[in-house]
Amino acid sequence: MKKQKVSAHLLCNRPLTHHSSSPSSPGFPSFPLHLSRAGVISQTAEQCELLLKCSVNVFQSLSDGMWLRCGCAASLRVLASPLRVLGLRRCNTAAFMPESAGFGGVSGRSGLQEFSVSSSESFWAAVARHRLSWIRPFTAVQDCDLSRGRIRWFEGGKLNVSVNCLDRHVHTCPDRVALMWERDEKGSEVRYTYRELLEMTCRVGNLLRRHGVKKGDCVTIYMPTCPLAVASMLACARIGAAHNVVFAGFSAEALAERIRDAQSSTVITVNQGIRGGKILELKKTVDTAVQSCPTVQQVFVAMRTDSPVAMTARDIAMEEEMLKEDVVCEPAAMNSEDTLFLLYTSGSTGKPKGLVHTQAGYLLYAALTHRYVFNYHDGDVFGCVADIGWITGHSYGVYGPLANGGTTVLFESTPIYPDPGRYWDMVERLQINQFYGAPTAIRLLLKFGDEWVNKYDRSSLKTLGSVGEPINTEAWEWYYRVVGEERCPVVDTWWQTETGGICIAPRPSDSDAEIVPGMAMRPFFGIKPALMDTEGKVISGNDASGALCLAQPWPGMARTIHNDHQRFMETYCQPYPGYFFTGDGAYRSVEGYYQITGRLDDVINVSGHRIGTAEIEDAVNQCPAVAESAVIGYSHDIKGQGVFAFVVLKKNVDVEEADLSRQLNGIVSEKIAKYACPDFIQFVQRLPKTRSGKIMRRVLRKVVELDLDSLGDLSTLDDPAAVQEIIQGHRELLSK
Ligand code: 6R9
């Protein structure tokens, strides 16, 4: 291996644009002609408006214009509190949603919602025509049959997602800021205009093409949240490759499993990541991962820090090679139903599932929800603090805001680095208008006290969003009262990797619509929720709880699980034939509002990150001293859920429990990720099992929740004495 230092500085020493200014539009780049000729670009009235409003930040952007800059609660039923937030002004329906002018007298938000569900095809056809730029118009709005797991939208149509996210905005407003990169190092944010982001994307697109990446290939991206990661995603979309972003906190083994499953031959990474001031050796992790990935032929390595890394024959210095590329890259004409990306997520059993999202439907749904749930308007700065490795980062960090020509913040740090004022300092500095974060962070910050919030000016904020897990009333009220100064609606948004975008949220709503703390409340346009009873029948009344299903398809939904449509069918389509089963439970209030009560399967949610108990058990069981284990989630006041592992050791194992606990934590972080490590490990002689050998997790949960009065029916237990031993052991563990 030779050591090679790649200079990221190369990139900032030369202007990024190769376009000359067009004489007819001073200051604008000449536009790649083939795009205009192909009729890809359409200019809406709203985009024209952008021209007037766009913030010019050319000097800042050019001087900072390097691609990667270096050196410098639980599922409880929340009672409706008397706190009510009044809705926004009553709006003229056509002004609110221009397409509605064609919906035959529909008025008001609830009228629109009803129309979107009862006349779903007309609704989605109008929105798709108006909001996406098509290379060729679609010929069929949808062709879906949930009972057969067949989901197709906008067939016959051709488009390019990167053109929709970039070129059309460059055409109208090249110097508008697309990305505000809030780097880990506080106060060193970097802005990228639409023109710069398009150029960066084109260079990456050309680079990938030159190295043999073709339409239909899948590129794995293992990078921190940064502009080059976004450009890499968009570059894949531009040349018709699918991307597979793997959260940069995942271990080498978890990464390798995802690379193999996605059959990627190309990986994009950085030399090192930096998060909360700590260096993450991402390139080294990739080196380890690719050893067990025979498909990988090339690894592009960008420089996030100054430290050189060992390069192998397989590695390519990304920025150096990008400089050789042209800034114009012909976009591929993609079919609506071609794959846009895979994103792996945990299920209750087996290995992680690679959910497949396709082009037009996903983009449209991300854009529409971004616009309406958050009331996003031209010129607003949208601050989603999710990592790009999760679906929230995909839909509301990248695709939704960019499809809408918005300015989106990429947050690379943590809520408490360098101190618990980080988010609000950023809100003031970047003038963020919509802030979208996770309850776990809100709960954490709440404990540090109001002064960290009050230190900063938050008057730019208009909407606050929450995602990933149920938000408890205390956190909701603090978010509303302290962070939002009782001015900003708090939208608790329920959705999943599988749904592509937000499905249930308090907004958009009619003018005087209330918002109930801790409730996602109202279905979005085109979404029809249904609750199912234990016999699989639809519950029709209100004030009822059941399994949450979605009764009709919507454009943003996942189409399949990569290479395993059977599993897609079994998980989502077969439990309630004709419906999409979400895996969550929900309560429908007397008023008809939805409240998510938590997962119905063995998936736990640690700080908003999904993890299957079976995955953790698999890792724990790989320790040679372990005979078997059972992992459960328990409610944790910061993380939402914590991980509790019951472990049975093999006979004659003689090790200190503390040493073994450390060893097990090491294995879990090596096999999965740090966040999946057990908070508690209890060593037991045996697990409570039924006579047929099934572990009775219900009993373990009750023990951990100290709810010993409702252990329930123990008569099916093989050996009831096991439970008493576990209760005793648990008491001892707590008293340590
Ligand atoms: C977007 C995202 C999905 C699971 C989902 C549910 C939980 C997400 C929630 C929520 C209650 C909310 N969840 N949002 N529970 N209220 N507002 O988080 O996707 O990582 O796939 O997780 O997260 O259990 O099923 P994903």
Image (spheres, grey):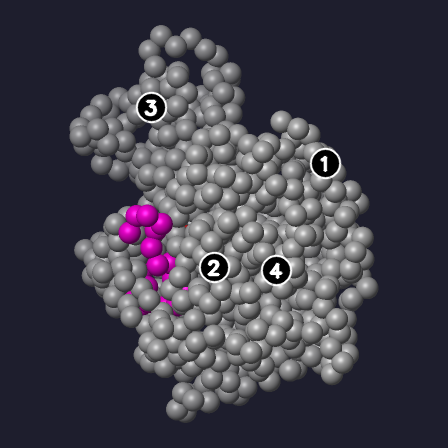
Secondary structure beneath dot 2 equals loop
Query: x, y percentage for residue 308?
Result: 71, 34
Secondary structure beneath dot 1 equals loop
Query: x, y percentage for residue 246?
Result: 51, 45
The amino acid beneath tag 1 is Lys
Marks 3 and 1, how far apart at CA = 47 Å
Say the numbered circle drawn on residue 240: 2
The amino acid beneath tag 2 is Gly
Relative horizontal placement of residue 251, taking residue 722 as reference (left or right): right
Residue holding disc 3: 628
Query: x, y percentage for residue 96?
Result: 53, 82
Residue holding disc 4: 202
Image marks 2 and 4: residues in contact by CB distance under 8 Å:
no
Residue 166 in view in this figure: yes
Residue holding disc 1: 5
**Considering only order in the chain, which callout, 4 or 2, is on the residue closer to the N terminus?**
4
Marks 3 and 2, how far apart at CA = 45 Å
**Considering only order in the chain, which callout, 2 or 1, is on the residue closer to the N terminus?**
1
Q: Is residue 59 magenta?
A: no
Specify the segment rendered in magenta.
544-565
Image marks 4 and 1: residues in contact by CB distance under 8 Å:
no
Image marks 3 and 2: residues in contact by CB distance under 8 Å:
no
Label 4 environment density (alpha carbons within 10 Å; few <14, some 14–19, many ≥20): many
Image marks 3 and 4: residues in contact by CB distance under 8 Å:
no
Identify the residue at image location x=61%, y=74%: 33
The amino acid beneath tag 4 is Cys
Relative horizontal placement of residue 403, taking residue 60 as reference (left or right): left
